[in-house]
Amino acid sequence: MIILKTDDEIELLRQSNLLVGRTLAEVAKIIRPGITTKQLDKVAEEFIRDNGAIPTFKGFPNPYGLPFPATLCTSVNSQVVHGIPNDEPLKDGDIVSVDCGTLLNGFCGDSAYTFTVGEVKPEILELLKVTKEALYKGIENAVHGKRIGDIGNAIQTHCETHKYGVVREFVGHGIGKEMHEEPAVPNYGKRGSGTLLKKGMCIAIEPMITFGDRKVYLESDNWTVRTRDNSVAVHFEHTVAIGLDKADILSSFEYIEQVLEEKN
Ligand code: MG
Ligand code: MG
């Protein structure tokens, strides 16, 4: 069942999602070669709790009932999603996808951003650029009267035109009082197919795009998803509300990108 949200509920979702954006900006401030993903996680958890919210990923069970142990998913290089923060220092040239979820005033925020660490190869920067573009092309289709397949098709077409892989095994989702609600929002699909989009639906759109082959596997920690060919992967995610003429983006990269601009 798809739960439609009222305008008031959408405002609460926005507040939770803006907190995610501000949390990711705290990560942006300190990310550099030598820092560990565990250090990033600590800063994020404190910031979320200081703002009266709960980190929703912490304790969230996977299909085996294993709870996620951290606030952030930190997926480095060939890790695609659901990486667990650890004590390994990030290195010059790495990329790290940071996914963050909050529960604030009963509503969930969910957004992800892929960061560069030091000097990253131009072909990897291009993958980041194209994946983010694909996210916004998906969002352009998150409009009343279109269908879920229109979103996936826009993302898939843009990424495959650039010869990148579109991960199939993990998808976006409806979001509200629960982090994962219906419908599923794949990053691939046929135009005009799938669930009809209606004003009041709120969804997380989250392309997971690989430099090489799209095939992935689950690591032995039963959380981390990695590319089979060990090529790098990128993940950007926004939570949006379906609008009559255009989508309302409830999360924000603006806080993050302001910090990144000031750092450069
Ligand atoms: Mg997420
Ligand atoms: Mg999500």
Image (spheres, grey):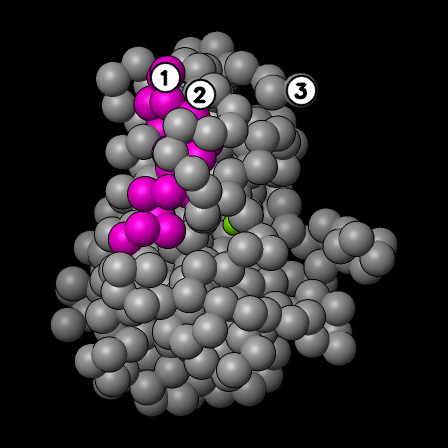
Residue farthest along the right direction in this orientation:
65
Q: Which residue is mark 1?
A: 144
At label 2, which amino acid type do we have?
A: Leu
Q: Earlier in the sequence, mark 3 or mark 1?
A: 3
Residue at 68% in and 54% down:
58
Residue at 45% in and 48% down:
187
Residue 56, visible in the rendered structure: yes
Q: Which residue is mark 3?
A: 1
At numbered mark 2, what does the secondary structure look like: helix, strand or loop? Answer: loop
Q: CA distance from mark 2 to mark 1?
A: 5 Å
Q: Is residue 108 above or below residue 65?
A: above
Q: Earlier in the sequence, mark 2 or mark 1?
A: 1
- Residues drawn in magenta: 142-158
Give the image location of residue 219, x and y in percent: 69, 75
- 74 left or right of 35 in image: right
Residue at 59% in and 18% down:
3
